[in-house]
Image (cartoon, rainbow, N blue to C red):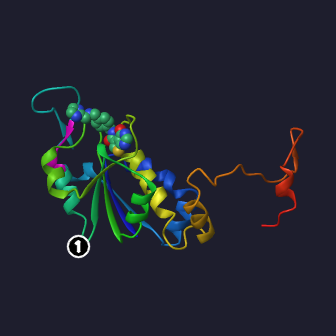
Amino acid sequence: MKIDVLTLFPEMFSSLKESIIGKAIENNLIEINLINIRDFSKDKHKKVDDTPYGGGAGMVMKPDVVYEAFKSIKSTSAKTIYLSPQGKILNQNKIKELSKETHLILLCGHYEGIDQRVLDEIVDEEISIGDYVLTGGELPAMVLIDSVSRYIEGVINKESIKEESFSDGLLEYPQYTRPEMFLNKTVPEVLKSRKS
Ligand code: 21W
């Protein structure tokens, strides 16, 4: 799967180089391209935002700059997702659905958001990761990338995915590993004789 990320803060995504997702990138199972929206500002001061029409606090990301950044991506069949507090809240079914796509474009807003006209033009879906306020769409984009990646063939073993399919609370259970005795507590008797 190819994932293009449109963001003003590409450095925030360096944590994806770690752990399981990092391995998946190294093994070419997922390809992540970070596109710095600021690179597409034609302004001499590289301006990317401006004050909102109608007044109000904060700044709004300029539609022309976001549009130029979007157009720099060569794509015929990509699905464009805007990470937004107004979006539909992400869940495991949506993750499963998105993992079947071959190309995702993730648009991260910052400040008060992005001019609605460019959103209307380029966005296919608007997604939130929950009802709490963050400072931008970058962490939500990373949450989406992490959870979608688990479904890409070869990223994690199939057993782990199968286990979670019946683990919506009811069949979830506490886990134990060695040592058998820790802080004077032992492992539940029923688990000791079990071979995986
Ligand atoms: C937070 C931007 C609040 C704008 C006037 C009219 C992406 C997010 C975000 C952010 C506002 C997600 C407004 C869960 C999140 C995100 C930054 C409010 C809007 N002002 N999922 N409308 N929580 N957050 N201003 O915050 O970009 S996905």
Residue 76 or 23: which is nearer the viewer?
Answer: 76
Indicate whether 100 appears above or below 67.
below
* 114 in the magenta segment: no
Q: Residue at x 87, y 61 (%)?
A: 193
Instruction: Tell me if I can see residue 43 in this picture.
Output: no
- Number of numbered discs present? 1
Q: Residue at x 51, y 73 (%)?
A: 153
Q: Is residue 108 left or right of residue 164?
A: left
Residue at the extreme top of the image, as rendered: 56
Task: Locate the C terminus by quadrant.
Answer: bottom right
Give the secondary structure at mark 1: loop
Image-quadrant location for residue 195: bottom right
**Amino acid type of the residue tagged 1 in the rendering:** Thr
Q: Label 1 belongs to which residue?
A: 76
Residue 154 or 6: which is nearer the viewer?
Answer: 154
Indicate whether 54 appears above or below 30.
above
